[in-house]
């Protein structure tokens, strides 16, 4: 159900969040063929970064359960290397999946 091109971007971007969006994009980019979407799909993803710098997925704005599970599997508890966002604060990113 995933396309081969994925891009994450902050909804209320701050200049310093560029590294975080790059990391999210890298986490979500399929490393193998995982199916195709019928059309390009934009999903809003709400995350929080805990005190261990791990991503916690709080919500995905999609009715496609396979896509939601993919996002959660690829992001949950992945450690961010960048320190450009505050810990224990919610952030919303748009993730664009294209075939």
Image (cartoon, rainbow, N blue to C red):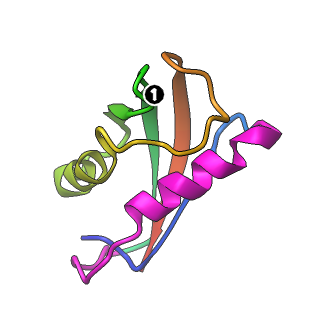
Q: Spot the residue most to the right.
A: 15
Q: Position of residue 32 (x, y in %)?
A: 26, 81
The residue nearer to you, when weighing 71 against 81, is: 81
The quarter in which the N terminus is drawn is bottom left
Q: Position of residue 62 (x, y in %)?
A: 33, 45
Is residue 10 depicted above or below 64 in this figure? above
Quadrant of the rendered image containing residue 41: bottom left
Q: Tell me what residue is drawn at x 41 percent, y 59 percent.
A: 27
Any part of residue 55 in sight: yes
Q: Secondary structure at mark 1?
A: strand
Is residue 89 depicted above or below 63 in this figure? above
Any part of residue 9 in sight: no
The residue nearer to you, when weighing 43 against 38, is: 43
Q: Position of residue 87 (x, y in %)?
A: 53, 20
Is residue 32 depicted above or below 52 in this figure? below
Is 67 displayed left or right of 43 in the figure?
Answer: left
Q: Per the image, is 23 magenta?
A: yes
Label 1 crowd bin: few (<14), some (14–19), many (20+), radius 10 Å: many
**Disc 1 marks which residue?**
49
Q: Tell me what residue is drawn at x 31 percent, y 73 percent.
A: 37
The quarter in which the C terminus is drawn is bottom left
Residues shaded magenta: 14-38
- Count of all numbered marks drawn on residues in the image: 1
Q: Spot the residue most to the top.
A: 88
Q: Tell me what residue is drawn at x 43 percent, y 31 percent.
A: 47
Is 30 displayed left or right of 14 in the figure?
Answer: left
Q: Tell me what residue is drawn at x 40 percent, y 73 percent.
A: 39
Q: Position of residue 72 (x, y in %)?
A: 26, 45
């Amino acid at each position: 159900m995933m396309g081969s091109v994925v891009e994450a971007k902050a909804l209320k971007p701050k200049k310093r969040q560029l590294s975080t969006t790059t990391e999210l994009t890298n986490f979500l980019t399929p490393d193998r063929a995982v199916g195709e979407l019928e059309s390009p799909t934009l999903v809003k993803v709400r995350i929080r970064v805990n005190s261990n710098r791990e991503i916690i997925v709080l919500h995905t704005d999609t009715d496609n359960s396979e896509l939601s599970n993919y996002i959660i599997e690829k992001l949950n508890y992945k450690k961010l290397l960048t320190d450009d966002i505050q810990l224990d604060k919610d952030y919303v990113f748009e993730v664009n999946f294209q075939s």
